[in-house]
Image (cartoon, rainbow, N blue to C red):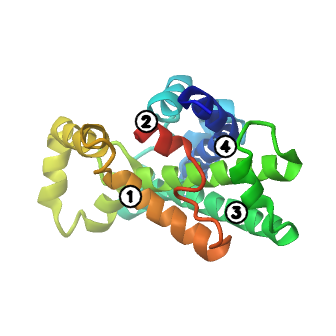
Amino acid sequence: MDRWQLYFTLVLYALPGLVLGFTFHELAHAVVAMRYGDATPRAQGRITLDPRRHIDPLGFGLLLTVGFGWAKPVQFNPYVVRSRVQQAVVAVAGPLTNLVLAIVFVIAMHLEIAADPNVPGDAIVDFQFGHGGAPVILYWFLVQGFFMNVVLFIFNMLPIPGIDGYMVFRGLLGGVIPDVFRWMDQNRQIVWFGAIALLFLLPQLSGGNANPLATVINHVQDFLYGNFVTRDFPLVGGFPSLFNALSS
């Protein structure tokens, strides 16, 4: 299978899990903001499982092609959700939902292997979209859904302005190191340039040898998969993922 065949196969298998991840991520933000009394998400039609209300076509397309994208951000009223802690809870709800979804995919894979222990081996041998029979096809959807939701969880927890993780860490540590967050707020372009250089340019310039984001993601995926699915078939190195294909 050449690189383009691999890419399109991964996209097809990753799409359902990615759509679920984006939809539940943004819905979680909206629901928590509503719990704090903010009617803004409901007024903007965000209390729904309709993916069209949450997915930004451009951001979604870029995520599938360059490995970086975004959904439609859920807005909240800072005069209603007032405290830093409340805003941090609204922010962390999205990434935590992706972690929960990743665990759901893990449980589903565990149950499928319990029913047929040969599925992971068959999936590695026959990696083509629609090949291998229903159990193998289902397993590939579960693996890629798991991959993508771990990626969404970790990326959205990065303490970079404009990303959920920044609001989470500012809510927890803003009173402890206010000068740090004040500087980051005032120098967002510098922070973003540094983040892009570290997370995206460094892996390309090093030929994939220095990839801090992928390293963290791979370790989390290996931990969850190895401890709760199976150790017989290593996840990283055995199963290709869309994120690793785009970041290599």
In front: label 3 or label 4: 3
Identified at 14% across, 57% down, the residue is 180
Amino acid residing under circle 3: Val
Give the number of the disc on residue 38.
Answer: none
Q: What residue is pinned by disc 3?
A: 104
Q: What residue is pinned by disc 2?
A: 68
In front: label 1 or label 4: 1
In front: label 4 or label 2: 2
What is the CA distance from the residue labelled 3 to the residue labelled 4?
22 Å
Q: What residue is pinned by disc 4?
A: 47
In the structure shown, which secondary structural element does the residue marked by tag 4 occupy? loop
On the rendered structure, is 80 left or right of 166? right
Identified at 27% across, 39% down, the residue is 196
Q: What residue is pinned by disc 1?
A: 215
Q: Give yes or no for contact between labels 3 and 1 (Cβ–Cβ under 8 Å).
A: no
Earlier residue among tags 1 and 4? 4
Q: Residues within 10 Å of mark 4 (few under 14, many from 20)?
A: some
In the structure shown, which secondary structural element does the residue marked by tag 3 occupy? helix
In the structure shown, which secondary structural element does the residue marked by tag 1 occupy? helix
Q: Residues within 10 Å of mark 1 (few under 14, many from 20)?
A: few
Q: Nearer the viewer, residue 156 or 79?
A: 156
User: In the rendered view of the protein, which quadrant contains the C terminus?
Assistant: top left
Q: Nearer the viewer, residue 20 or 63?
A: 63
Identified at 48% across, 65% down, the residue is 220
What is the CA distance from the residue labelled 3 to the residue labelled 1?
23 Å
Amino acid residing under circle 4: Ile
On the rendered structure, is 41 left or right of 9? left
Q: Position of residue 124 (x, y in %)?
A: 68, 52
What is the CA distance from the residue labelled 3 to the residue labelled 2?
24 Å
Amino acid residing under circle 1: Thr
